[in-house]
Amino acid sequence: MSLRMALLALLTTQPMTGYDLSRQFSSSVGNVWHAADSQIYPELRRMHKEGLLDAESVPWGSKGATKTQYLITDQGREAVRDWQATVQPYTPDRDPARLKAAYFEWADSAAVAAQLRAHIQHFETERAHAEQQLEAISSREQPTIARRLEHYSADDHERILAFKLFAYEGKRDQAQHEIDWAKRGLKLVDQLGEGRVEV
Amino acid sequence: MSLRMALLALLTTQPMTGYDLSRQFSSSVGNVWHAADSQIYPELRRMHKEGLLDAESVPWGSKGATKTQYLITDQGREAVRDWQATVQPYTPDRDPARLKAAYFEWADSAAVAAQLRAHIQHFETERAHAEQQLEAISSREQPTIARRLEHYSADDHERILAFKLFAYEGKRDQAQHEIDWAKRGLKLVDQLGEGRVEV
């Protein structure tokens, strides 16, 4: 569902091949919904089959080869509207980092610290990506954003940009919260000193 | 992997039937790793097959019926130690709420507000669960915690409790961050006023 909406959202701006989509994906919406190429291509074919996308052959390279280009249909636009009009349900939490931390007593101090440093590193990367997106959105210079804005009247720009900033600010602040949490964990390890409880 | 570790962790304290485990799960570790009964029972059978658990028949009720009780094996304890000794890798983010928020311009103000209120409600519930766990851990009165502590020497109690508090404080603060984010979103909707961008 989410992958589908992420792909449809990109296609509202212009028709794209699977290759174009996969490239744009990773530099834009892929920051909030990661997907591998091995998921993107089959999802495009499924959406084509279901009528959410049209497909046409376009020339590719200089040797007479072609590629499939996808276009969003009215049904596809309707699916995006429905997604936005309907409250998405929430699923209960599954948090592997917190699960592991709840039983850190079975690790020695070095292993706990290593896990917490990996946590910090991961969320520093996530924070950096969010900050890049925030800058790209504010400057309106990132290609995906620039194309989206061209597609809409100036009246709509404020709304489009405001919600994107809101989304990525949430992501940045969440990453910061995780970094702060892991840093508190490193302090706790120091306070507790060496030790490990037998499983 | 995480479900497996959550179940093994519960079984380090005492042997349990699938029924006991499923009940204890939802009131303790299920707060950081949700699992349905339909996942718990097959996972127990798989772990038994792989030698991480032993199984024995125990009387159940008064009519001569029996149930399978599971006991953690040395190999099971080794799996828990390995889990804690090894840094768990992180996967890229998949955040359906942030994905949807990045395209809120396609929803009318009422639909955005409804989604954000659902976000707040979900994380208020998550925060409440985390606070219940924090209280249960601090008071040492929650049955799962009390049994775990009985199982270990008093020297180990500080370490056991400290990491559990750390884990659930992280969960509580994360929930609070999500509530704050959604509240900022509600203010933004007010500022932007009525409006919806055509998909």
Image (cartoon, coloured by chain):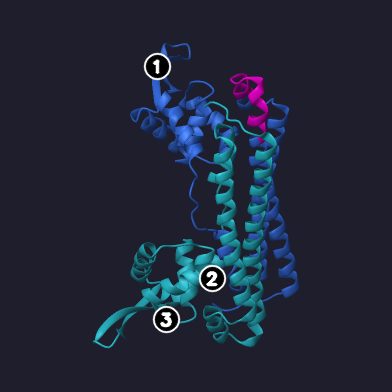
Chain colours: A cyan, B blue
| Distance between the alpha carbons at the discs numbered 3 and 2 | 18 Å
Q: Which residue is mark 2?
A: A81
Residue A112 x %, y %: 57, 40
Residue shown at the point (60%, 24%) measured from the top left = B148
Chain letter of the residue carrying label 3: A
The part of the image, by quadrant, that contains residue A106 is: top right
Number of marks drawn:
3
Q: Which residue is mark 1?
A: B57
A186 left or right, relative to B40: right
Residue B110 x %, y %: 67, 67
A9 left or right, relative to B171: left
**First to last magenta residue range:** B146-162
Work out which quarter of the rendered image holds the N terminus of chain B and state it. Answer: top left
Q: Which residue is mark 3?
A: A15
| Distance between the alpha carbons at the discs numbered 1 and 2 | 55 Å
Residue shown at the point (53%, 45%) measured from the top left = A96
Front residue of A199/A95: it is A199
Closer mark to the observer between disc 1 and disc 2: 1
Residues packed near mark 1 inside 10 Å, few (<14), some (14 to 19) or many (20 plus): few
Chain letter of the residue carrying label 2: A
Residue A122 x %, y %: 55, 56
A57 left or right, relative to B141: left
Label 1: which secondary element: strand
Q: Look at label 2 and name its amino acid.
A: Arg
